[in-house]
Image (spheres, rainbow, N blue to C red):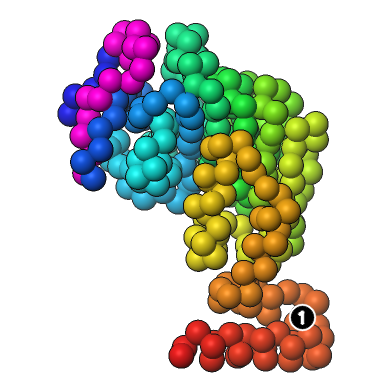
Amino acid sequence: MDHMSLFNLFSLKKPEPTFQLRDGNWASHYFQELDHYTIEGFFFDLDRLVVTFEHAASANKSDSYRHGWGSVFFRKKSISHICVKAKANHWYQQPGLEGALSKLRDSGLFDRFRHRLTYGGSMGGFAAIAFADLVNATTVLSLNPQSTLRRRSVPWERRFPEARAQNWNGPFSDAKGLAKLPKKIITIYDPHVRGDLRQVKRLDQASLIQVRAPFIGHGLTRPLTSMKMLTPLLMEATQDRFDLGAFHKDLRKRRDILRYYDILERRRRVLASPKFSSIVAKAKSDFLKRTSK
């Protein structure tokens, strides 16, 4: 693998192709191994840059060369991106990341791009907000984000017990009050997941765009992919033209995925009402008949 040195990467007027991808495309490649993180970048041009943070469920964290969050998609679209890959589910609270991103920022790398987006989901959604200013992000796309897992700040939070045991006293331990630079912080979440709703409500409201996606649960990438909404969402976000009205309209497609009905039938209000239970059961039955043909 031919990696770009920091000197060569930062001195280029435009990215120089040094790494051939499987599809035959070429990109400048950057790779940095830290104690608790791996940072990998692919650079195609200086128009758009996406900095991604993976979620807790990302597989095979011991493999530093695994695909970073969203990297396969962004490579196919020839969109420059940097992937931050955590070596454990420490929620980006281990040392090293601040220094590495600060070095890239101070070199002037991020400001060479016209539009800069941070992107992640859940654990990664937290980091996309918390570290946005370090990469001079202009926009944040955060799926079902958490604001913090610091016990004294969110004593009601009972999820993620392993993560809550981390040391949450560092400068990037609470996304509330961070991310002052982005003009837009797009958060997408299911308001009926009470923990997610309470976490989002803690975030500063000035540049926050709250997108409610009812009855599709906590992990959003799979249902958004099933509804064919993830690709246009990412393309719009990277081009700074997110259309909230069109996104809400497309959310009607959730009636075409099984997960929507599975979540609905477990709702307390539905379980408590024979009438509602019957309505949801019929709708689910009709969906299954329709999709089995």
Instruction: Give the side of residue 73 with respect to residue 121, left or right.
Output: left
| Quadrant (top left, top right, bottom left, bottom right) of the N terminus | top left
Magenta highlight range: 7-22
Q: Check the image and report above or below for 244 versus 25.
A: below
Residue 8 falls within the magenta-colored stretch: yes
Q: Vertically, is 112 above or below 188? A: above
| Magenta stretch encompasses residue 146 | no
Q: In this view, does 251 lie to the left or right of 87?
A: right
Q: Residue at x 67, y 22 (%)?
A: 181
Residue farthest left in this picture: 1
Image point (57%, 44%), residue name: 236
Does residue 163 appear in the picture of this structure? no
Query: What is the x, y in percent for residue 175?
Result: 67, 31
- Residue 134 drawn above or below residue 224: above
Residue 25 x/y as whole percent: 25, 38
Q: Which residue is drawn at 60% across and 90% down?
A: 285
Image coords of residue 154 (percent x, y): 74, 41
Taking depth in this image into account, of 156 and 17 the one nearest to the observer is: 17
Q: Position of residue 52 (x, y in %)?
A: 48, 36
* Element on which disc 1 rests: helix
